[in-house]
Image (cartoon, helix red, strand yellow):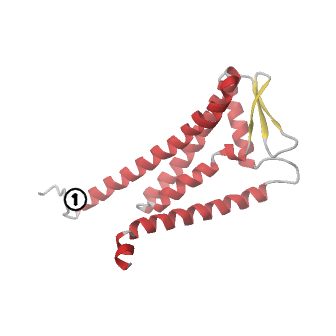
Amino acid sequence: MKELFRKYQAVLRFLLIFLGSYILLSLLYGGFLSLSRGEEATPDVITQNVAKQSTALLNSLGYVSKVAANKDLPSLQLWVEGTQVGTIIEGCNSLSIIILFMSFVVAFSGPIKKTVVFLFAGAVLIYSVNLVRIAILAIALYQYPQYQEPLHTIVFPGIIYGLVFVLWVIWVKSLNKTKKANSSFEGGKGDIYE
């Protein structure tokens, strides 16, 4: 049993750190959501900002758009050219995806400065791509409402999750390069003096 544990120690460490980070960040996010909601059916501050920023992006692209509060649910209705094309809910603010991204990077952490910079840059990129994704989805739903189901459930979630996957691959490859560079300076394999 000890042999098995020793053999898979790195995998178990990764899983424990990943799950621990994910649970901790999710609990913090859940607490934030609980504190940020008032008595009325209003979404959290970040979801409201995402809705406003997406609307501003749509307007800059030449589409008259606005958001309106949904009186029954903590969400915002998104309107393009006088047509309601969707509803922006808490799940649209990209924070749950950023938590997933961060948990992986922390579990596969490298040097602290490099990790923190990558976490910040990745979170900003995911948030920004999410705004663009919402704007393009709104335009697509306005232009092609008959394709709502595949656009909303397959194409556009695939974009944001695909981005997270690409960031993870970049992170792991950058750690491998750092590891190889460090081993070459320590006289390991690939040493420039060989």
* The N terminus lies in quadrant: bottom left
Q: Quadrant of residue 143?
A: top right
Mark 1 burial class by Cα count in 10 Å: few <14, some 14-19, many 20+? some
Task: Say which of 113 and 1 sits in front.
Answer: 1
Number of residue marks: 1
Image coordinates for residue 115, horizontal then vertical, percent: 46, 57
Image coordinates for residue 114, horizontal then vertical, percent: 43, 56
Q: Residue at x 68, y 26 (%)?
A: 141
Q: Quadrant of residue 79?
A: top right
Figure check: 175 above or below 5: above
Location of mark 1 (residue): 184
Instruction: From the viewer's perspective, tell me whether residue 131 is left or right of residue 82.
Output: left
Task: Say which of 184 and 97 sits in front.
Answer: 97
Local secondary structure at mark 1: helix
Instruction: From the viewer's perspective, tell me whether residue 52 is left or right of residue 162.
Output: right
Image coordinates for residue 24, horizontal then vertical, percent: 61, 65
Q: Residue at x 83, y 45 (%)?
A: 73
